[in-house]
């Protein structure tokens, strides 16, 4: 067991320089606040580690917690993502699909809910940050199978 640990440690030691070849100028520091893009993010036109990339995820945050509501536990899941679209072909990476449980049963429907959905696009126009909010008519639902729906599907 000890030999395996030492072998793995040596392997990671030799591989680490391969993965750490980015310099400080290759990577931007994205804002970790939702709805607060930086000028550096907005001016970014290429992604140095992959100059052919059409889009890049700058920031993603997930959180799951249980809330007690009316003597019933509910799972509350939050998801934040910041995607930089670098080329027009990359807009599909900003299409978001949220699958959720929805099953008809005797006496009603067991269903999860999607609430507080917010999405915006940010662009630079004449040196100023312009925010375009998501239009609600771009959000729709579609049944995936008898138990699940695609909800809040937003197409850029």
Image (cartoon, rainbow, N blue to C red):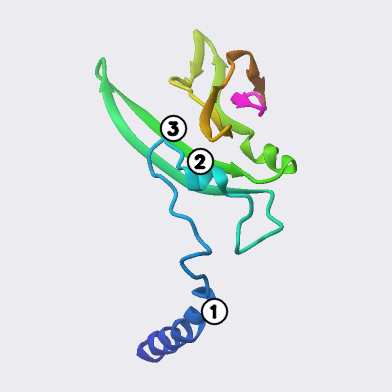
Tag 1 near tag 2, CB within 8 Å: no
Earlier in the chain: of badge 3 and badge 1, it is 1
Residue 59 appears left or right of 51: left
Residue visible at 62% across and 26% down in the picture: 154
117 or 71, which lies in front?
Answer: 117
What residue sits right under mark 3 in the picture?
35
Start-end of magenta stretch: 144-156
Residue visible at 52% across and 13% down in the picture: 109
Provide the secondary structure element on which disc 1 rests. Answer: helix
| Quadrant of the rendering where the N terminus is positioned | bottom left
Q: Nearer the viewer, mark 3 or mark 2?
A: 3
Residue visible at 67% across and 21% down in the picture: 142
Mark pair 1, 2: CA separation = 27 Å
Residue 150 can be seen in this image: no
Residue 74 appears left or right of 38: left
- Give how far across and how far down residue 33 sits, in percent: 38, 39
What residue sits right under mark 1 in the picture?
18
| Label 2 CA crowd tier, 10 Å (few <14, some 14–19, many 20+) | many
């Amino acid at each position: 067991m000890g030999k395996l640990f030492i072998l793995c440690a040596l392997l990671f030691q030799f591989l680490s320089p391969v993965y750490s070849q980015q310099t400080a100028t290759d990577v931007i520091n994205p804002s970790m606040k939702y709805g607060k893009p930086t000028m550096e993010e907005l001016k970014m036109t290429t992604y140095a580690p992959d100059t052919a990339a059409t889009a890049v995820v700058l920031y993603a945050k997930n959180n799951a917690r249980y809330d007690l509501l009316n003597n019933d536990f509910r799972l509350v899941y939050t998801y934040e993502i910041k995607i930089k679209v670098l080329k027009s072909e990359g807009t599909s990476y900003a299409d978001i699909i949220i699958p959720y449980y929805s099953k008809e049963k005797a006496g009603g429907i067991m269903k999860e809910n999607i609430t507080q959905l917010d999405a915006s696009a940010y662009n630079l126009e004449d040196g100023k940050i312009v925010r375009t909010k998501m239009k609600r008519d771009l959000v729709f639902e579609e049944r995936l199978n008898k138990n699940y729906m695609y909800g809040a599907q937003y197409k850029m």
